[in-house]
Every structure is written in C-alpha cells, then in structure tokens.
Amino acid sequence: MAQFPYSIENLIAELSNLPGVGRKTAERYVFYLLKRPKNQLEKLCSAISQLQKQIFICPQCGNFSEQNSLCAICASDKRDRQTLCLVAESHDLIVIESTAEYRGLYHVLGGTINPIDGITEEQLNIRKLLERLKNEKITEVIFALNPDLAGEATTIYLKKLLTPFNVKLTRLARGLPMGADLEYADEITLGSAIKGRRDV
Ligand SMILES: [Zn+2]
C-alpha cells in the first residue's frame, strides 16, 4: 500500500490513537493542518507541549493542577472539607463544578472498574482515598459516577471498602438516565441530582 511521507504517516498514527478518531479522520486532520499558516501550527504545538510541562496531578485528590502541588480546589479555604465527591475523571469534576451546587472536595478515581476495558480496582486511585478518609475530617462521600455498569460495579466495590470508616455514603439522585454520561448531563439535571442525593 502506498504511504504518505514519514512525518505525515507519523502524525496520522498519533492522532489515530485518540478516542473516537479513526485513520480516515486522522488523515483529514493532518491534511487540514498542512494547509494552515505556520504560526497556527506553532500555536497548536506549544499548547500540546504546555500540557506536558504545566499540568500536574494534585497529590491529594488526583485532579489536574497547574502547579506541582495541591489543585485550586484542595488548596481553597472556601470549600466544605467534610464532604467528598467521588468522580471517575477530572472532566466529571468540571461538570459538577459548573452546576455551582457543590462546595465540598473531590476525589478523582481515574476511571471505573470495567473488566471489558481491562480496568481493575488496582488501577484506580483508591489507596489515597482510604488514606484521606483516615486522615481528613470527612463525614460524607458522594458517589458521582456514571449510571452505567462500570459505575455500579465501582460503587458496590467501594461501598464495602468505605463502610468501616463510618461516613455517610450517598449517590446522585435518579433522574440521570441509565447508561448516561455525566459529561452530557445538563447543569440543571445534574444540580438537582446532587441536591436530591440519597444513601448508597
Ligand atoms: Zn486536589
């Protein structure tokens, strides 16, 4: 099969690794980029390289941080430090923040237990969660995981693990459709799901 020059093939291969991007889409992106003015390509390159240099993982909650220390939420003195909201990914945290209904802290698991994708509990940020429950004055943990099979499996697993800590375990109210992604829930639905949370 005929191949494009190496630099083009190389970028196509890299972009094809992105979620939802197949080879055809990657090719379209590369040929679009080739037609852009040089300074725009430089801007894109520097935005990507800044991701690597300027973004750190918060040692407390696992969220992204702009400094090599606590993220803005963990460092803030305006948050309720007794409530911890468990999310699978940092982008779920952003969605919950956008509802302005929640003022507590977060813990980012880094995924949910999903045997099909090969994600097991060992790969999740659980050890730090247990440490936090031991050392911080947390009285409630809210499970804000996607209402799908992996979210349920993770909730069941963690419920067992967290019960001995004697904290209130709650989950978002129903109203989010089964199989839905928090990411796509509108702010009002998600906001009322937080307010109407119930026991796990
Ligand atoms: Zn943090």
Image (tube, rainbow, N blue to C red):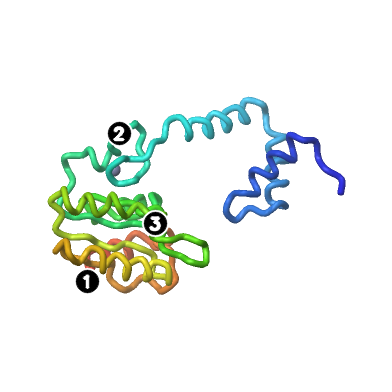
Which of these two is toward me, 65 or 39? 65
Q: Residues within 10 Å of mark 2 (few under 14, many from 20)?
A: some
Report which residue position mark 3 lands on: 122
Report which residue position mark 2 lands on: 69
Q: What type is the residue that disc 2 sits on?
A: Ser
Q: What type is the residue that disc 1 sits on?
A: Arg
CB-based contact (under 8 Å), mark 1 and mark 2: no
Discs 2/3, front: 3
CB-based contact (under 8 Å), mark 1 and mark 3: no
Chain-order first, disc 1 or disc 3: 3
The residues tagged by marks 1 and 2 sit, at their Cα atoms, a distance apart of 33 Å
Residue 170 visible in the snapshot: yes
Q: Quadrant of residue 76?
A: top left
Q: Residues within 10 Å of mark 3 (few under 14, many from 20)?
A: few
Outermost residue to the front: 122
State the image coordinates of residue 138 (x, y, percent, origin top left): 15, 54
Which of these two is toward me, 187 or 88? 88
Q: The residue tagged with tag 1: helix, strand or loop?
A: strand
Q: Which mark is residue 198?
A: 1
Q: Is mark 3 within 8 Å of ligand 1?
A: no
Q: Is mark 1 within 8 Å of ligand 1?
A: no
**Is residue 49 depicted above or below 194 in this figure?**
above
Discs 1/3, front: 3
State the image coordinates of residue 141 (x, y, percent, origin top left): 22, 60
Discs 1/2, front: 2
Residue sitting at x 18%, y 55%: 83
